[in-house]
Image (tube, grey):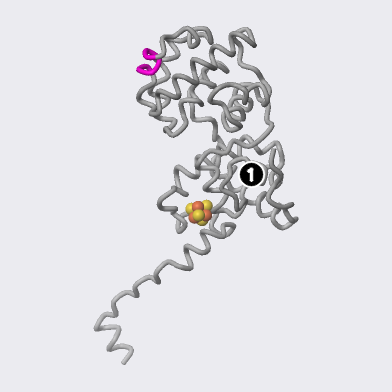
Amino acid sequence: MAEPTSKPSAAERKRALEIVAELYRLYPDAKCSLDFTTPLELLVATILSAQCTDVLVNSVTPALFKKYRTSADYANAPLEELEQDIRKTGFYRSKAKHLKDAGQMLVERYGGDVPRTMSELTALPGVARKTANVVMGNAYGIVEGVVVDTHVGRLARRLGLTTSEDPVRVEQDLMALVPQKDWLPLSHMLIYHGRAVCQARRPLCEECTLVALCPTGQANLAAAPAPIPAKTSKKSRSAKD
Ligand code: SF4
């Protein structure tokens, strides 16, 4: 795995911890937004969540999980039927192939169970570190890294916690800055903040309670046009004159 971009200073660590503390205050109940009851369901939901909102995935999975209950069900599914069952989530052809091939591998190597290690999970079709971190952290309580999706990457850069566009390097930078106990909640909280306040197109810096800790927020506020002064009334003008 890549090394962090550079070793963080004590001041950078301190600022990161202040950001984490404020996120805990804002989102004390942040959790994985995908609906699941088993490791297999979470693995499937996370594969489906690529380039798709969790809300949309959650609208598809109740029927899917009812129909496909085991790894063998995915392995044995006719590909075209599986494609139609997940069509709404987009990129459905490659996702269906990943689900079928992953189901096959789970049956052949792990008796149908979802493995618990990074190396075993990332060997599955359609599973990179992000998906493996989601499954390990949320289904098994094993935290080996930080989940870096588009929200987490964007916020980490805006908050000055990384300069990298590469998710693996972003993850390394966050792991170097934040204690391991906070890795899983941090990704959940950044995702919540990315949805609620620090949206991709228009971050609401003027409303954001992280602004004092955020270089992008500071720059955005400094660049914002000055408020138009209230029109001076005749009365006040004459009072002044
Ligand atoms: S201050 Fe602005 S850029 Fe920084 S985290 Fe808040 S909304 Fe995002």
Q: Secondary structure at mark 1?
A: helix
Please tell me which residue is depicted at 56% across the width and 60% down the height of the picture. Answer: 215
For the N terminus, the image quarter is: top right
- Say which amino acid is labelled 1: Arg
Image location of residue 232, percent across then percent down: 29, 80
Q: Is residue 166 left or right of residue 198?
A: right
Image location of residue 181, percent across then percent down: 70, 36
Q: What segment carries the magenta color? A: 80-85
Please tell me which residue is depicted at 55% across the width and 36% down the height of the picture. Answer: 188
From the viewer's side, name the closer residue of 95 and 52: 95
The picture quadrant where one finds residue 239 is bottom left
From the viewer's side, name the closer residue of 4 and 235: 4
Please tell me which residue is depicted at 42% across the width and 66% down the height of the picture. Answer: 224
The picture quadrant where one finds residue 30 is top right
Q: Is residue 124 left or right of residue 74?
A: right
Q: Where 30 falls versus 153 (above or below)?
A: above
Q: Is residue 187 magenta?
A: no
Q: Where 223 falls versus 239 (above or below)?
A: above
Residue bearing mark 1: 169
For the C terminus, the image quarter is: bottom left
Majority SS type along the magenta span: helix
The picture quadrant where one finds residue 114 is top right
Image location of residue 150, percent across then percent down: 50, 41
